[in-house]
Structures are given as structure tokens and as C-alpha cells.
Amino acid sequence: MTEIQSLARGLKILDLLAAAEDTLGITEIAEHLGMDKSSISRVMQTLAYYGYAEQDASTRRYRLGPQVVVLGQALLNRMPLRDQARPFLQQLVDRTGECAHLGVLAQNQVLYLDQVESPATLRVNTRVGTLAPLHCTALGKALISFGSFDLPEPLVPFTSRTITDPDMLRVHLAQARKQGYAVDDEEYNYDVRCIAAPIYNHDNKVVGAVGISGPAGRMNLERMPETAAVVCEIARALSNRLSFRRS
């Protein structure tokens, strides 16, 4: 492949800004990419001019710009799975009273592709476009339980309930496969429980997962089996909509 050097530099910088937890300076970016500061400065000025990066006026450091959000939203809006899933997410909310989510695999994480909010005053929302870990979210565990995806490494703890031992997680995922759905029992956020089930396409491949999230007090353990049955029913209905036929 013939690479356009200046374009490649810009794309690498965008990846770097996306992965950074804070703003980055010209020197840091140059060191990360092994490039001279003058070249980086020119690329950053161009990215900032077109809105793909923005510079903090006081520190002169850079972060991602708003145009990245515009592109991301445009991509999400053009994904056919999102369009197909929207009425099924609404059914989940109508029947459970909790927030409903659609997730797909992206960058070895779960990408929240869509959400329908709960009408309840106390609810659990997750911004569309959010990336979250596979091993401690219900959507993520549904993807790796039923799909042909590897366990993520490392298994980072987010709460004291996060499963960080690979063997224990494999046992947990096997139980999810047996029961037909995955659960996040306060493993990613305290006081939040989630249930998710896989979505299959016409080739019998997992293409995503749907689920619900709610406060642990309302999503109590006694309610879980009944609620999980609704999640599984709607996940199957969406799979049928995608022309899934179990062999």
C-alpha cells in the first residue's frame, strides 16, 4: 500500500489524542510518534483549523475537537443494526421500565451503539458512543460468552465485584451461555445491575447484544429471572428480524 505520509501522521495523532486521558502537548506527541516538533506543530494547526483537534488557550495543549463527534455520530446513524434495533429497545423499556442499550464489539471493547432511556426518575444512562470493557459489563459479557471473541487482557477491576481472574471469568461466561444471558452485578459501577443477551445475524454469528441497566435496588435479585426472560425474548425477536435461523 502506498501511504500518504501527511494523512497518516494526522490519523496517528487523532488515535493518540483519543487514547489520552488528558490533553497532550506538541513535545509529547512528537516523542510518542518519533517525529520532529515542527512537523507535529503543522499537522496540529491543520487539525485544529478543521475542528478535529482543539487547543487549550491557557496551556497550549491539544484535545480532540468537536468535528470528531460529528463524524462519529454520522457513522452511528448510518449503521443498519441501529435502525433495526431501535423498536426492540423501546419494547425493552416499555416492558421492564429500565434503560435499554445496544452494543457491538469495537477495539476489543463494547461500543454503546444506541440507547432508549427509562421514564423513571432514577435511571442508569450510558452515552451513545461510549466504549466500555467487555469483562465487567453485561453487553460485553454477552458478546464474549456467545461470540467467537477472546477474553480481554488485562482484566482491570472497576469495583470490588469485578471478576479479575481469567479462570473464574470463564466459569462465569459458561454459566451465561447455559442460561442464555449475561449479568453485570455491580461489577462496572456500584449500585447498578445489567442484563444482556446476544443478537445473531442470518449467518448465525453474534453481531451485537441488547440489554437493560437499572439501579441495583430496583433490579433486585428476585426480579432478575423474570426480567432476563424479557431481555432474551426481545433479543431473539431482533435476531429473527435479522433473518437468524438457529441450526
Image (cartoon, rainbow, N blue to C red):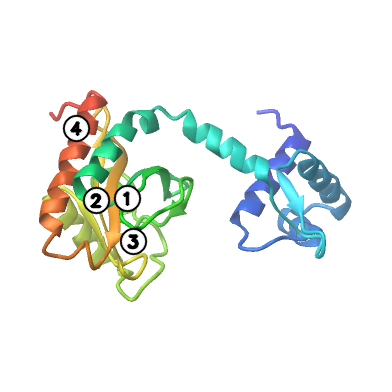
Q: Earlier in the sequence, mark 2 or mark 1?
A: 2
Q: Quadrant of the C terminus?
A: top left
Decide if residue 236 is on the left or right side of residue 51. Answer: left
Numbered tag placed on residue 118 in the rendering:
1
Question: Which label's residue is closer to the chain start, 4 or 2?
Answer: 2
State how far apart marks 4 and 2 are (Cα): 19 Å
Residue at image coords 34%, 70%: 190
Disc 2 + disc 1, Cβ < 8 Å: yes
Give neighbour class at mark 1: few <14, some 14-19, many 20+ (Cα, 10 Å).
Answer: many
- In percent of width and height, residue 242 lies at 26, 26
Where is residue 210? Give x, y as percent.
29, 43
Three-letter code, disc 4: Ala
Residue behind mark 3: 122
- The residue where tag 2 is placed is 97
Instruction: Give the residue drawn at x 66%, y 53%.
Output: 17
> Which quadrant of the figure contains the N terminus?
top right
Q: CA distance from mark 4 to mark 1?
A: 21 Å
Nearer to us of marks 4 and 2 is: 2
Residue shown at the point (32%, 50%) measured from the top left: 118
